[in-house]
Amino acid sequence: MPAVDAQPGPFSFDLDSTALVVIDMQRDFLLPGGFGESLGNDVSQLRRTIEPLAALMAAWRAAGLPLIHTREGHKPDLSDCPPAKLNRGAPSMRIGDPGTFGRILIQGEYGHDIVDELQPIEGETVIDKPGKGAFYATELSDILEKDGIKSLVVTGVTTEVCVHTTVREANDRGYECLVLADCVGSYFPEFQQVGLKMIAAQGGIFGWVAESPSVIAAIQ
Ligand code: C5J
């Protein structure tokens, strides 16, 4: 059973029951000129994850292990977007408005899809989720159960929002979660730092934290 150096201690996982989850690496969040940047965010804080994540995905695929992508977004008629989410804050652009890359966070639009460097390949699961967590109103739970998955290696954006929500949901459902610090990103450096600390604090209150090279070495 491979094990990697992690916080708060070694993370062991079985190759037959571990999936890599890549959360919301979408153009709307990551591309310069897109929705994320329109909110005043520094997208370079997210874009630094692309290279290590591409290397991890290549190694994961080479090892023949299951890879699951998620995308946050909504139906074109916004029927799955609660008003509380749609109307939150005072952004210059809202979900569903026309943006640089099509209607913002709307399924089927260019901006809603995953960045070119990390596009899914045939056979990989893509979960469309209306919420921050990947379990809420999706088929993820059924897929993991059907495939006998017990551990998740979690990557993507943003650390303190969709990554945290998903890891907390997964932890409550009994999954062991390893979050990779170099493959998750926040627009806010302080949230990145504290977000990672929160996961591994108190003996790993809802997961472990490591770096991707140690996982790549463990699966080769
Ligand atoms: C946010 C996400 N931050 N994927 N989405 O709205 O974290």
Image: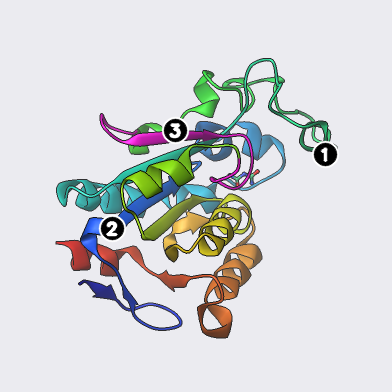
Name the secondary structure under disc 1.
loop
- Residue hosting label 1: 88
In the picture, residue 130 is in which quadrant? top right
Q: Quadrant of the N terminus?
A: bottom left
Horizontal and vertical percent for residue 80?
Answer: 68, 27
Q: Is mark 1 within 8 Å of ligand 1?
A: no
In the picture, residue 150 is in which quadrant? bottom left
Type of amino acid at the residue the image marks with label 3: Ile
- Residue hosting label 2: 17
Type of amino acid at the residue the image marks with label 2: Ser
Tell which quarter ligand 1 is in. top right
Residue numbers of the magenta segment: 120-136
Horizontal and vertical percent for residue 172?
Answer: 56, 63
First in sequence: mark 1 or mark 3?
A: 1
Q: Is residue 183 left or right of residue 160?
A: left
Name the secondary structure under disc 2.
helix
Q: Is mark 3 within 8 Å of ligand 1?
A: no
Q: Quadrant of the C terminus?
A: bottom left
Q: Is residue 31 visible?
A: no
Q: Is residue 90 left or right of residue 16?
A: right
- Residue hosting label 3: 114
Q: Indicate which label's residue lies in the foreground, 2 or 3.
A: 2
First in sequence: mark 2 or mark 1?
A: 2
Residue 111 higher or lower than 192, as above or below: above
Q: Is residue 28 left or right of residue 89?
A: left
Mark 2 neighbour class, 10 Å CA radius: few under 14, some 14 to 19, many 20 or more: some
Q: Residue at (44%, 64%) from the top-left corner?
A: 177
